[in-house]
Image (cartoon, rainbow, N blue to C red):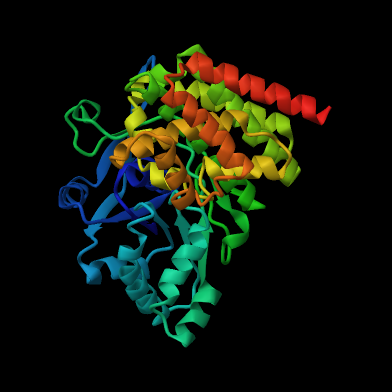
Amino acid sequence: MKKAVMYGGGNIGRGFIGALLSQSGYQVSFIDVAEAVVTALQEKNTYPVRYVTSDGHEDVWIENVTAVNGNDTEAASDAIANCDIMATAVGARILKFIVPNIVAGLRKRWAKTDAPLNIIICENLMDANKVLEGMLKEQLTAEECALFDKTVGLVEASIGRMVPVQTEAMKDGEPLRVCVERYGFLPVDKAAFKGEIPAITNMVPCEPFDFYIKRKLYVHNMGHATCAYLGDLLGLEYIYQAIAVPEIRILVHNAMLESAAALSKMYNKPLQDLLDHITDLLYRFTNAALGDTCQRVGGDPARKLSPEDRLIGASRTAMEMGITPAYISIGTAAGLKRYIAENALEQNMDSAKKVLTQVCELDVSGKLAQRILGNYALLLEGATVQDLLKTAQEQKHQSLLNVI
């Protein structure tokens, strides 16, 4: 049986990528440092994935799995040295901690074979392949770097499946159970593979892959975050509650349309395909059974407000394509309010300007910053979501008049 290593046995590792590898005929070894998960996988060699919808659920058992502890470098590197394919899903901030084990595994591998190893990188991180490559090569010799370039494919992936934080109720008496939505396609960078592209269930090799990365970040992730931050304004706990508010749904929908129009123009992709994708996403946001919270989806606002990430990056892309990001800027202002609150700053214009300068790396006198600051000022004045929607509509109307 073919062997796969899934580095990361958490929600995405077990609830998506590891499951696809198992269903594609691989014996899957998870590498993780959570002892309870590692022990349970070693003992049971199976675990359930539960597909949940607002109408019910279905359990599917994932077979032919085991695990090794990531703190055991010998065992982890052996698994990497002997696998046919590998994937990572550990979180962007954890990548640097798994590099030593990967390097050790590659060295063992190169000692006996020059067969290619493709590593599918399932991290929510722009240019994840370049980031991981830099980390790995820092620990390799010049000769090993040459071997790396010849034999290792760092394959970016776009993770579209929504997997919330797992509650005890979701586990339903089975600690390894992961509840997920049914959506399960995995776009990957076709050009990054070394050797033959493996046949993996629901994996879709695509090029140019930069389009799919930005579609995920600037349409899906941006729309999700906008929904979360607008839900914050109303004190709502869940994403499905927020998207059920008509004004929030319109704001989110139109923010996603701004990004879609920009990406369609930038990459010469059919707009209708992007519109269909948005329709599907909006429906998926309504899945109450996921129990996805505004707190989780809007978490780590510093990253979400960074220059190339979902909010600022989407706005800048829209402006490059001649599209006014009126609706995206509403979500950004709400995200700015959350960041200020979480960092115990005063909710005032000085704090907002400081965050836009230091976190978003924007010139506060520029058009985008001024638009965001104007929306944030409305929040300080107690604007409702109805007020925010009206403001965005007026700004969009004015931008269209300017074009005419």
User: Which residue is depicted at the point 49% across and 76% down?
Assistant: 148
Frontmost residue, 396 versus 224: 396
Q: In this view, does 118 lie to the left or right of 403?
A: left
User: Which residue is depicted at the point 35% across and 26% down?
Assistant: 290
Position of the C terminus, as image quadrant, is: top right
Residue 150 rendering spot, x and y as whole percentages? 55, 76
155 is higher (above) or lower (below) than 393: below
Q: In this view, does 380 lie to the left or right of 29?
A: right
Residue 177 rendering spot, x and y as whole percentages? 26, 35
Using the rendered image of the protein, determine whether residue 180 is visible from the camera's viewpoint: yes
Frontmost residue, 348 versus 339: 348
**Quadrant of the image occupied by residue 233:** top left
351 is higher (above) or lower (below) than 276: below
Using the rendered image of the protein, determine whether residue 50 is visible from the camera's viewpoint: no
User: Which residue is depicted at the point 25% across and 28% down?
Assistant: 170
Q: In this view, does 155 lie to the left or right of 106?
A: right
Frontmost residue, 236 versus 220: 236
154 is higher (above) or lower (below) than 347: below
Residue 25 rendering spot, x and y as whole percentages? 42, 49
How many marks the image carries: the answer is 0
Residue 35 rendering spot, x and y as whole percentages? 16, 52
User: Which residue is depicted at the point 44% across and 78% down?
Assistant: 113
154 is higher (above) or lower (below) than 66: below
